[in-house]
Every structure is written in C-alpha cells, then in structure tokens.
C-alpha cells in the first residue's frame, strides 16, 4: 500500500489493499479514475516528474506505466522474476529506479533495475550481494543505494 | 531517501520517542513523545519542516520539526498505514486500512497543514 502526491500537489495517487490504483483530486477528494487490472495488492507508486504518468508495481512482478489523466495502461516494462518492492522516478523524470524483493525471503538479494521510462530500455541492472535496505535519487543524478550485511552498512552509487 | 528498509520498520526508540539530531555533531535537538504507542511510520516533509508519525493506535501527529510543537493531530477510526506530504508541504495524505476480513478495506484522507507562521 502506498500513497503519493503529484509533483504539482494537485492529485493524490494510491495503491491499495483492494488491488486498485486510484487518483484523487487533492483539494476536493473527488476520485478522478480507478485502475483495477492489478491482480495482487500493489506495493509502490510514483508520478513522473511532469505529472503526466503514474508508475506502479507490486507482487505480480510487473511495472506498469499509466496515463495520469485517464488511468489507461500505456506500457508494461519487462517482467522480472522478483517482486517490485519500491520504485522512484529520477529527478529529471527520464528514468525510474526499481528495487525488487525476492519472494523466498527478505535476506535474499534481489536486483535494482533502472529503466528508461519512455523507451522501456534497461539503463542499469545491479545485483547486490546483500539485500537493499534503502536508497533514492540524489541531486547530481546518481542513485544511492544502501545494503546491510550483519557486519556493515554499504552505500553504493549507480551512474 | 525514499525507500524505507521495510514497510513497517519502527523508527522510534523503544522508549516511545522520536529524536531529531543535528549533523555532524549528533546533538539531540528535539524529542517527540508517542504517548506509549509504537510508530509504524516516521516521515519528514521535503523541506524538512514537518515531522509525521503514524502510530499503532491509529493516531497521526505532525510536529513542527524546528520548534517541536504538535501542529496537526488526528485519530483514525482504522489502522494507520502510510502517508505522504505534498511537495510544497501544505497538504498531507493519510492512508488507513481495516482488519482483514472486515468491510472496511482502505481509505485515503487529505488534510491541509498550517501555513507558514
């Protein structure tokens, strides 16, 4: 379950326990649209930087691009064998970083993949030795990622 | 940083307090009481002005991170799940869920936060 504001603050997108994606008007609360084609509860959602699209992912292992004004599905990114756990659109709006989760256990590493949003191409694919525990885009365009082993916290950067 | 380690990692200490430290000195600036509850999410607004904690009793509080004052508080009828601040820090969205198997599954409520004073 996740909730996020659009970059201009006018809309709220939610990914919820009824497996629906909903977009509301932030001021009036009015439902603008609802997307019901996720088969399992989605975990993570974000708007693109221009507010025109919504990206959503979850346990059905797919990452979907939706039109933020209509709720229509526009693109399905290449499906992985792991669950989409977290996603975050880059600050320039061109890429999305996706952290996957291995469904067999939280201590099993799963990849981080950076997709080009418009083409769907994979920009980076990185498999850490230990699971990802946090991260995000920083202002110089790099993606910082943290992994935790029993004895150490490591910070990594992807170009 | 946008990805929490786990969806429900309790970031508050076992003494039911959330603390703000200065960096790199590591001095505690403010300590926020959760009144015996356990925080299920702690969130800072993008500009750092607001600190939110949603707790296991369904209470959502927003503090002014500079003064330590509670500036917004609401008691949900259902379980707090997650929340988000608007990019300008003027609005808050809170998502609540119900018990599995009950009629109530999910709701999002939005609230306006106090404007700058």
Image (tube, coloured by chain):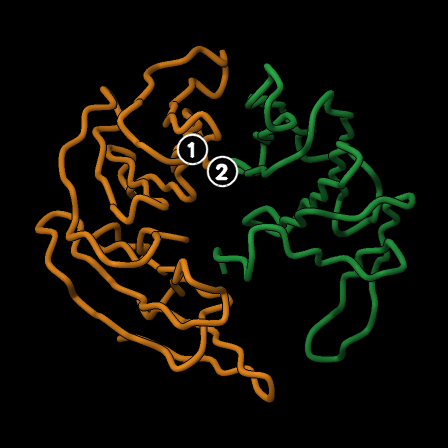
Chain colours: A orange, B green
Closer to the camera, A58 or B17? Answer: A58
Residue B114: percent from left, percent from top: 69, 29
Residue A93: percent from left, percent from top: 25, 50
Circles 2 and 1 on the same subunit? yes
Q: Which residue is mark 1?
A: A15
**Residue contact at pointers 2 and 1, CB within 8 angstroms:** yes
| Vertical side of A28 occupied by B95: above or below | below
Tell me the CA gap for discs 2 and 1: 5 Å
Dividing the picture into quadrants, the one containing residue A97 is bottom left
Mark 2 belongs to which subunit?
Answer: A
| Vertical side of A1 occupied by A23: above or below | above
Closer to the camera, A137 or A102? Answer: A102
| Vertical side of B15 occupied by B22: above or below | below
Where, quadrant-wise, is the C terminus of chain A in this rendering?
bottom left
Residue A125: percent from left, percent from top: 22, 70
Is disc 2 surrounded by few (<14), some (14 to 19) or many (20+) residues within 10 Å? Answer: many
Q: Earlier in the sequence, mark 2 or mark 1?
A: 2
Residue A1: numbered disc: 2
| Vertical side of A111 occupied by B91: above or below | above
Dividing the picture into quadrants, the one containing residue B106 is top right
Closer to the camera, A67 or A142? Answer: A67
Lateral position of residue B25 relative to residue A42, left or right? right
């Amino acid at each position: 379950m996740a909730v996020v504001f659009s970059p201009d603050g006018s809309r709220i997108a939610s990914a919820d326990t009824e497996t629906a994606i909903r977009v509301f008007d932030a001021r009036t609360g009015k439902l603008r649209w609802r997307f019901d084609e996720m088969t399992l509860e989605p975990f993570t959602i974000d708007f693109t930087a221009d507010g025109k699209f919504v990206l959503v992912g979850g346990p059905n292992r797919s990452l979907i691009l939706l039109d933020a004004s209509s709720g229509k599905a526009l693109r399905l990114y290449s499906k992985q064998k792991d669950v989409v756990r977290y996603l975050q659109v880059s600050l320039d709006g061109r890429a999305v970083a996706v952290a996957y989760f291995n469904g067999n256990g939280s201590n099993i590493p799963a990849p981080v993949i950076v997709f080009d949003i418009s083409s769907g191409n994979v920009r980076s694919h990185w498999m850490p030795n230990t699971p990802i525990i946090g991260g995000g885009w920083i202002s110089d365009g790099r993606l910082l990622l943290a992994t935790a082993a029993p004895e150490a916290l490591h910070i990594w950067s992807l170009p | 940083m946008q990805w929490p380690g786990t969806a429900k990692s309790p970031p508050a200490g076992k003494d039911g307090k959330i603390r703000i430290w200065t960096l790199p000195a590591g001095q505690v600036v403010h300590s926020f009481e959760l009144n015996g509850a356990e925080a299920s999410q702690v969130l800072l607004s993008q500009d750092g002005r607001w600190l939110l904690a949603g707790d296991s009793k369904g209470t959502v509080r927003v503090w002014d991170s500079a003064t330590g004052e509670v500036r917004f508080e609401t008691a949900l009828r259902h379980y707090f799940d997650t929340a988000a601040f608007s990019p300008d820090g003027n609005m808050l969205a809170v998502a609540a869920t119900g018990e599995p198997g009950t009629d109530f599954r999910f709701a999002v409520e939005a609230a306006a936060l106090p404007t700058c004073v």
